[in-house]
Image (cartoon, rainbow, N blue to C red):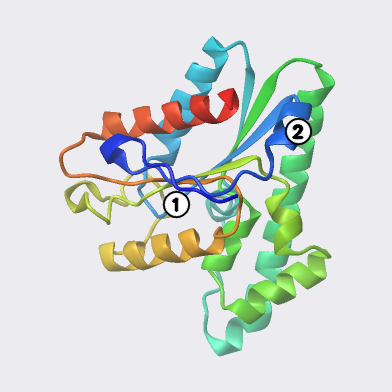
């Protein structure tokens, strides 16, 4: 069954109901925070952590892998035709690192035999928004996985809409050295990321609204998580 849920005027969107039994059996909840640039992922992650800890969850936060690479000195190869092989290798190794981090976080969290949550700053499917479709398919092939298998790694996906859509005056690149997109580029990227995750049975979109503050947006993020784990 598929349905749409709007959390008040903030526009939280929920698609599907296929993973409930999986979530109830697992004691490690796996949450992806994604969305376009400057959407509030870092703030959302901190607030979710606090809210879930109040619900007696152990909470672990997994960093954004592309930012780790870029801040380590690596440069994104770009989309030029002569850079395709370099781009492919970059994205293959990025996904491998992402998968290893995710697996390690979940295994360590589950070893404690306590109710736990791992929050990922982006997931493997985000890669699809940054590369041509044929490159993403090659990445999946080289890593020996597919999109359906990747979806199963995440219990819920929270898409925090970029400030470039509906909150343009707050859009900035100043708080992330890996962020270089203009407002127009950020808008386009947000839509690509949203489309990349289409089909996940628990995808929530937290939209911006002129009449609401950023704190209201983060509150919707938290209430969406709480509503999800209570179902």
Kindly indicate the quadrant of the structure image that contains residue 219: top left
Please state if 202 lies on the left or on the right of 21 as rendered.
left
- The residue sitting at 43% across, 46% down in the picture is 13
Crowd band around label 1 with a 10 angstrom C-alpha radius: few (<14), some (14–19), many (20+)? many
Residue 173 is left or right of residue 103, and the answer is left
Q: Which mark is residue 106?
A: 2
- On residue 35, which mark appears? 1
Q: Secondary structure at mark 1?
A: loop
Q: Of 227 and 69, which appears nearest the observer?
A: 227
Across and down, in percent, residue 143 comes to: 80, 64
Spatial separation of the CA atoms under disc 1 and disc 2: 22 Å
Q: Residue at x 57, y 78 (%)?
A: 132
- List x then y, in percent, for residue 33: 51, 42
Q: Which mark is residue 11?
A: none
User: x%, y% of residue 128?
Assistant: 58, 67
Depth check, front residue: 12 or 121: 12
In this orientation, does residue 177 appear?
Answer: yes
Q: Is residue 154 above or below residue 46?
A: below
Q: Residues within 10 Å of mark 2 (few under 14, many from 20)?
A: some
**Outermost residue toward the bottom in this view:** 81
Residue 152, horizontal then vertical, whole percent: 73, 48
């Amino acid at each position: 069954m598929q349905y749409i849920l709007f959390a008040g005027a903030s526009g939280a969107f929920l698609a599907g109901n296929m993973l409930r039994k999986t979530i109830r059996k697992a004691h490690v909840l796996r949450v992806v925070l994604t969305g376009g640039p400057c959407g509030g992922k870092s703030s959302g992650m901190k607030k979710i952590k606090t809210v879930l800890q109040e619900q007696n969850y152990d909470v672990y936060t997994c960093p954004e892998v592309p930012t780790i690479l870029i801040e380590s000195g690596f440069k994104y190869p770009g989309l030029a035709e002569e850079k395709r092989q370099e781009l492919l290798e970059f994205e293959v190794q990025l996904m491998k690192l992402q998968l290893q981090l995710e697996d390690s976080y979940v295994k360590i969290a589950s070893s404690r035999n306590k109710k736990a949550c791992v929050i990922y700053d982006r997931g493997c499917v985000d890669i699809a928004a940054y590369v041509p479709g044929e490159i993403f398919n090659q990445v999946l092939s080289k890593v020996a996985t597919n999109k359906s298998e990747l979806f199963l790694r995440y219990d819920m996906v929270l898409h925090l809409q970029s400030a470039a859509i509906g909150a343009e005056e707050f859009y900035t690149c100043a708080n992330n050295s890996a962020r270089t997109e203009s407002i127009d580029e950020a808008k386009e990227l947000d839509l690509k990321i949203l489309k990349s995750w289409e089909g996940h049975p628990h995808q929530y979109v937290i939209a911006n609204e002129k009449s609401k503050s950023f704190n209201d947006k983060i509150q919707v993020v938290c209430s969406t998580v709480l509503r999800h784990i209570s179902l």
